[in-house]
Amino acid sequence: MQRSVLWKLSVMMFLEFFIWGAWLPLIFGYLPELKFTGLQQSIILAMFNIAAILAMFFSTQIVDRNFAAEKFLAFSQLIGGLAMIGLAFVTDFWSFLGLMLVHCLFYVPTISITNSIAFTHVRDAQNDFPLVRLWGTIGWIAASWPFVFLLADWEKIPSFGSVGFVDWLGAALGTAKTGTAMVEATTWTFIVAGIGSIVLAGFSLLLPHTPPKPVETGSQTLAWLEATKVLALPFIAVLFVVTFFDAAIHQCYFVWTGRYLMHIGIPSNWVMPVMSVGQFAEIFTMAILGYCLKGLGWKRTMIIGILGHAARFAVFAYVPVPGVAVAINVLHGICYAFFFATVYIFVDEFFPKDARASAQGLFNLLILGVGPLVGNFLGPWLMETFTVDAVVNYQKLFLVPSLTAVFAALLLLLFFNPPPKEPVPEAVPLGAAEP
């Protein structure tokens, strides 16, 4: 493959996840500062999940059948970017909700679209896609870490050189803005994300051409219907169910981990860097994913990814020690790469060519939509269930996702048996027998 193509695809992934990483980590603390109620906050955050569900039936259908993917990406990022910038200047619920909905409706489909573009132009999906996709993780990290310093209260931090470097760095990392100053500073996360989106809109026009795929004779006119037909195959149906479980478990990690880390003694300003330890590990894991897939195969690779959740939550439950909690976050990268990234690669190899973007959307329906939506509502309910006298019983709480992950891994072990080489036929009628 020409290096220029790989370079363009890598930049595309960097910018795609830079956008998401710039605003998501801090919005959980920003919304309460706007005096939104808990229900209003949940509704705003649910827009991302709802957009993932709608994308399955509309946006990816449009791309698969009607438009060049790179042009759709450019249009979507332009509109989504303008809406994101608008979020920096509104503070009332309905305006914020409307702009967030617009952004998510246009941004979320591009996660599937960028995957589809990458898979179309890499020669070897198992080897090349992980190397392209790891730049998305680098983009997320690049967006989130600078805000640790940008949100510091520099008026309370000694001038550089007036104290030792270690003392200065400790003050810079441990002195965050509060109140109105914090709210005003956090608005820059939306502006930075919006600018990144507009940059990607322009850069998309430089991406290799990815034309729409016309309907083949005997295929469904609706691409998402063509993709869902493959669920009639038992091994695809099992993977679909397991993906739902894994996506819900994955979201619970984000819902619970921040409070857990502070509970065991990690300072609040270090929570985001601690959680990003897993993303650094993800870079390495994505780099070697191709070798792991060839050596371990689909099933064992995915099982390892799911069991990573079980191990991490078990350690959280039984070893509530700050240093151990930081170290075990390394498994986050393995959980993502060995399952979610592997699922994307698997989908590209086993689904019909004319419906691959919709097939990616079908699994994103779970990975970004239904699974996280369930996790967003189930997570707080479980935490409340295991709270007695304002103290959360984290041991019992974390055993729920840990045992669920073990159950999902067993489903894969016993019932996920894809054909070793032959892909799924281009058109598989409902009710057809597995080849």
Image (tube, rainbow, N blue to C red):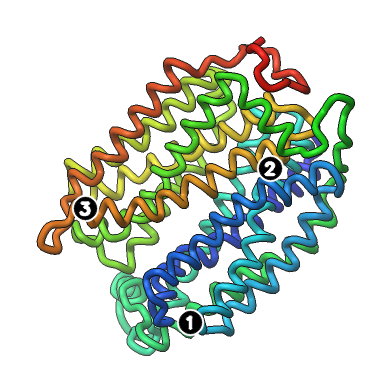
Nearest to viewer (mark 1 / mark 3)? 3
Q: Residue 185 shows which numbered tag?
A: 1
User: Sequence order check: which comes first, mark 1 or mark 2?
Assistant: 2
Query: Looking at numbered disc 1 in the image, what kind of residue is underneath it?
Result: Ala
When asked about the image quadrant of residue 248, the answer is: top left
Q: Residue at x 69, y 31 (%)?
A: 348
Figure disc tally: 3
Query: Alpha-carbon distance for marks 1 and 2?
Result: 33 Å
Q: Which circle marks residue 115 in the picture? A: 2
| Residue at mark 3 to residue at mark 2: CA–CA distance | 38 Å
Per the image, the residue denoted by label 3 is: 385
47 left or right of 72 in image: left
Look at 51% across and 84% down and name the residue there: 91
Q: Is residue 17 positioned above or below 63 on the image?
A: below
Q: Position of residue 11 (x, y in %)?
A: 70, 52
Sequence order check, earlier mark of 3 and 2: 2
Q: Position of residue 261 (x, y in %)?
A: 26, 57
